[in-house]
Image (cartoon, rainbow, N blue to C red):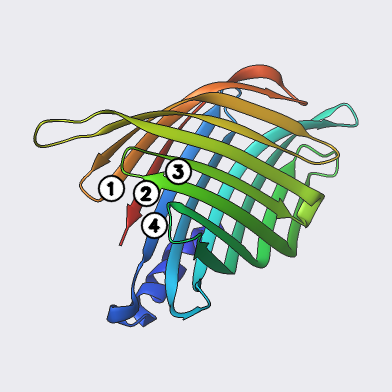
Amino acid sequence: MARLAPIVFALILLLSPESARSGDLFTGFQMDDDAQYFTYLGLREDLPWEVSGLKGYVQLFASGQTYEFESSNQDIDADVQSLTPSLGVTKALAGGPWTVSALAGPQLRWKKEEGFTNDSGRDLDVGVFLQAEAMYWQETGSFHALFSYASLDDFFFGRLRGKLRTFSPESGCCYVFLGFDVAGMGNDDFRAVQIGPLVEVPVGRVFLLTRGGYQNDSSSGSGGYGGLEIYMPF
């Protein structure tokens, strides 16, 4: 499913009126020291309506990940891909730097698990995805809180992220932002926490962010992780 994302993104851009196009493109990749990875590609586009300060938007989010777990004394390798189209609303609080948003939509997930004695397990499931965000933004820094829930596997994810501008060039490129990430995730079968620093550098309209740090999860114990994110408004 996630492999179809670039085609769907292109169709959304082509079918949207030029005057109505305003949104964000974002992608990223993360890997830990057990070679388990998570990668994603997302597109968020504003809708041309506003009611009582609420603005609508649509979002398409595709992701892929691999991980390993133990079942009945066997090591199982899982490959999971998902595609999540969503409809959301956002609102600026009192016209200030704070904005809040929420979205909901179906989640299509394809999962393959290899290592079972009966060769492999394959599943295609459909569930519900919910997400809420709060953002404080100024030119000198920002704070972002995110919480999501996926009904497939009853999986929760939460993250707090803060950034401050620590370097401003007299001319030319580039500003430098330093900050932190704190994240927690899991369900009844799995728990994980991550914490670490981040560095963000805007280059023109493209924001490049690298991050890494310490993680602890219920399947692998303590370890490290690192990742790269790219964000571009349009």
Q: Residues within 10 Å of mark 3 (few under 14, many from 20)?
A: some
Q: Earlier in the sequence, mark 3 or mark 2?
A: 3
Q: In this orientation, which residue lies closer to the viewer: 210 or 74?
A: 210
Asked whether disc 1 touches disc 2, contact meaning CB atoms under 8 Å apart, the reply is yes
SS category of the residue bearing label 2: strand
Instruction: Name the N-terminal-most of marks 1 and 2.
Output: 1
Residue 112: percent from the left, percent from the top?
70, 49
- Report helix, strand or loop for mark 4: strand
Residue located beneath label 3 in the image: 28
Against 61, is 221 above or below? Answer: above
Task: Say which amino acid is labelled 4.
Answer: Leu
Task: Tell me if label 3 and label 4 are in contact, CB under 8 Å.
Answer: no
**Discs 3/4, front:** 4
Mark 4 is surrounded, within 10 Å at the Cα level, by few (under 14), some (14 to 19) or many (20 or more) other residues, namely some
- Amino acid type at mark 3: Gly
The label number, if any, that marks residue 101 in the structure image: none
Q: Residue at x 28, y 79 (%)?
A: 18
Q: Amino acid at mark 2?
A: Tyr
Secondary element at tag 1: strand
Between the C-alphas of marks 4 and 1, the distance is: 10 Å
Which residue reaches farthest right? 72
Q: Which residue is the site of mark 1? A: 206
104 relative position to 125: left or right: left
Badges 2 and 4: C-beta atoms under 8 Å apart? yes
Quick one: label 4 or label 1, which is nearer the N terminus?
4
Residue at label 2? Answer: 231
Q: Which mark is residue 25?
A: 4
